[in-house]
Image (cartoon, helix red, strand yellow):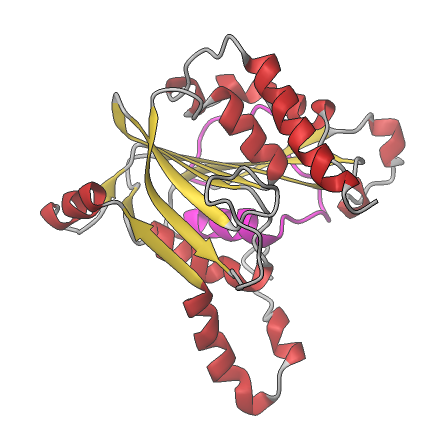
């Protein structure tokens, strides 16, 4: 498991024999695959470092974060240029269009009139043991030396540690972490110690910190086990954050889009009640 503070815990090692450790870690690489459209691949081949130039990059992890970016960022004037497949099994239900809450496809979008603006949407939470491979494979294809990275994620208030009862904090609420290279002020209070970010969002922020990239992580804490309007709208002020404000276009049907996303997840949840 990854935390922003640089601690990488080999969570899978507890579930395998010592003799199988090396093989198991190698297998993790095979569970994470990245595929680029022909045009994007050809662009990378023409560059000196074999990477796509990216001045602005958004990583959205989980249904709440992707619901936000789908509504306010990638809804218009974006094209899919790549996809990441992570931990898929033969019996997984996958529409390959993020039309099912169970989809295990992460799409990489590029803004048509701002080709150095990229968004990666992961509709589901990537398992911690895949996070390192996921980040390394993705970031090895992007040149973000002069760019900005913003990471969106969500988790439950049960994960939040505070002397104040979370019920008194009016969840859902937002907290932020940033790399040392990001000199601005995040648009949410800083995540207080001893809280830590975990999973894919933390792994991405750790990567950015190590490589001295400008990056901010925004984590939404919610007490709802189902995706709801309140959680989605907690992200709404971030449409004016850097670099999102340069990557988005107005969505006049935002409320309608949000309703469709909530209804989709509600319908899926009620199937198992």
- Looking at this view, name the residue that lies furthest to the bottom: 19
> Is residue 185 something one can see in this rendering?
no
Residue 33 x %, y %: 39, 59
Say whether residue 192 is magenta.
yes
At 48% from the left and 41% from the top, the residue drawn is 179
Screen quadrant of the C terminus = top right
Residue 191 point in image, percent of width and height:
67, 38
Q: Relative to 129, is 27 above or below? A: below
Front residue of 54/95: it is 95
Q: Main secondary structure of the magenta part?
A: loop
Count of picture labels = 0
Quadrant into which the N terminus falls: bottom right
Q: Is residue 138 above or below residue 163?
A: below
Where is residue 71? Give x, y as percent: 52, 22
Task: Give the left or right position of residue 73, taking residue 66 as reference.
Answer: left
User: Residue reaching furthest top?
Assistant: 252
Q: Is residue 192 above or below residue 188?
A: below
Residue 186 vs 83, above or below: the answer is above
Point out residue 70 in the picture as x, y percentages from the top left corner: 50, 27
* Residue name at image x 23 percent, y 42 percent: 52
Q: Is residue 188 left or right of residue 270?
A: left
On the question of residue 41 being in view, the answer is yes
Residue 49 belongs to magenta span = no
The answer to which of 30 and 21 lies nearer the viewer is: 30
Q: Looking at the image, which residue is at 61% across and 73% down?
A: 12
Q: Residue at x 13, y 50 (%)?
A: 45
Region rendered in magenta? 180-209
């Amino acid at each position: 498991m990854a935390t922003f503070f640089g601690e990488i815990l080999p969570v899978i090692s507890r579930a395998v024999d010592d003799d199988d450790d090396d093989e198991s870690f190698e297998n993790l690489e095979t569970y994470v695959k990245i595929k680029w459209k022909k045009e994007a691949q050809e662009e990378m081949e023409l560059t000196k470092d074999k990477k796509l130039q990216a001045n602005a990059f958004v990583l959205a992890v989980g249904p709440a974060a992707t619901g936000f970016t789908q509504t306010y960022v990638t809804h218009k004037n974006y094209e899919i240029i790549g996809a990441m497949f992570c931990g898929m099994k033969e019996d997984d239900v996958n529409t390959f269009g993020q039309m099912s809450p169970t989809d295990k496809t992460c799409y990489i979008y590029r803004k048509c009139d701002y080709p150095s603006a990229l968004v990666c949407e992961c509709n589901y939470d990537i398992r911690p043991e895949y996070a390192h491979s996921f980040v390394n494979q993705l970031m090895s294809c992007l040149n973000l030396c002069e760019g900005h990275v913003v990471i969106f994620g969500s988790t439950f208030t049960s994960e939040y540690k505070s002397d104040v009862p979370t019920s008194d904090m009016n969840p859902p609420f937002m907290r932020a972490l940033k790399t040392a290279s990001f000199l601005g002020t995040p648009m949410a209070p800083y995540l207080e110690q001893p809280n830590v970010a975990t999973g894919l969002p933390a792994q991405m922020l750790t990567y950015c910190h190590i490589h001295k990239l400008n990056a901010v992580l925004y984590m939404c804490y919610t007490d709802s086990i189902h995706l709801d309007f309140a959680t989605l709208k907690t992200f709404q002020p971030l449409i004016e954050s850097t670099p999102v404000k340069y990557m988005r276009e107005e969505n006049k049907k935002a409320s309608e889009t949000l309703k469709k996303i909530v209804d989709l997840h509600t319908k899926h949840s009620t199937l198992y009640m």
